[in-house]
Image: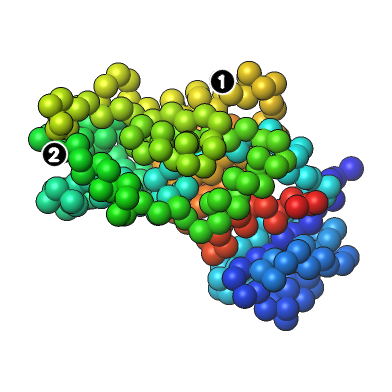
Amino acid sequence: MTTAHHLVIQAPGLDHNLAEHAAALASAQGAQRINATAVRLLDVEHDADTRQQIRDWCATRSLDFAFIPAGRSLASCRILAMDMDSTLINIECIDEIAALSGRGDQVKAITEAAMRGEIKDFSDSLTRRVALLEGVPASILERVYAERLRLNAGAENLLAGARAAGLKTLLVSGGFTFFTERLQERLGLDETHANTLEIIDGKLTGRVLGDILDGAAKARHLLALATRLGAERHQVIAMGDGANDLLMMEQAAFSVAWRAKPVVRAQAAYALDHAGLDGLLNWFEGN
């Protein structure tokens, strides 16, 4: 017996007529308006052909969609794991450090190639980028945090909803502890992991202390938390945007591509391309 599924359609300013059209495409047995931006279509067809038809239809109308097993509440999950740069926040921190120090073009080119999956060894790409920052005043880190770093839309609502439902929040980043630690304090995150920039005499040395936190390390941190909590894969949500997030996302039934690169979007179970981060909350019943 196959599990019944609902289909959540959402976008800023969702048009009611579009929701009705989606209901017809998916042979929905009913509909629930979740809020002004989202609707849940009940007991839909969810075979491969229907999923592809909905995917193509939504793509041409700037709509997000998600086929969700009926009856799933957010409280049935145990962990929300997130990437930081370009997922929880609006920037790639290393690119902004480089830009403020006049080294932006060199660093950004490596970052973009790595995120697209063109540079397969993340540790090598990070080592090369950090080396370009040798001699940069450490005070630039504070400038990036204060002047450039912003939370992506819906971040605070998402985290508040996760906490209210009893989930543990995990931030795992190939970026830097300078930023993850401040975000942990600011947002009340349960656990954070990232790379530590070496600073001597108030300047970056161009090196990272200890082992580099790469994609495999992200997955290990998530699995370690799941083991401590006794959480199973179907109770895990993992969100990311770049190739370095894929191993972590593989550990989650709810793997979510956020404004993601094509290589990530193709492998994730779900995606948010138009709604805010808190669009994830609309997938679950009772929120």
Q: Is residue 51 above or below residue 204?
A: below
Residue visible at 22% across and 31% down?
127
Quarter of the rendering containing residue 194 = top left
Q: With 236 as the anchor, is 248 left or right in this view?
A: left
Point out which mark residue 136 bears: 2
Q: Residues within 10 Å of mark 1 (few under 14, many from 20)?
A: few
Q: Is residue 206 above or below residue 144?
A: above
Q: Position of residue 266 (x, y in %)?
A: 51, 50
Q: Please, what is the three-letter code of the amino acid marked with disc 2?
A: Val
Quarter of the rendering containing residue 132 = top left
Q: Position of residue 31 (x, y in %)?
A: 83, 67
Q: Which colour assignment does the render follow?
A: rainbow
Distance from the alpha carbon under mark 2 to that under mark 1: 35 Å
Tag 1 or tag 2, which sits nearer the N-term?
2
Q: Please, what is the three-letter code of the amino acid marked with disc 1?
A: Ala
Residue visible at 69% across and 71% down?
36
Q: Nearer the viewer, mark 2 or mark 1?
A: 2
Residue visible at 66% across and 69% down?
37
Q: The residue tagged with tag 1: helix, strand or loop?
A: helix
Number of numbered markers: 2
Q: The residue tagged with tag 2: helix, strand or loop?
A: loop
Q: Is residue 238 above or below residue 19?
A: above
Q: Position of residue 106 (x, y in %)?
A: 16, 48
Q: Position of residue 24 (x, y in %)?
A: 79, 73
Q: Which residue is mark 1?
A: 224
> Which quadrant would the N terminus be assigned to in this image?
top right
Q: Residues within 10 Å of mark 2 (few under 14, many from 20)?
A: many
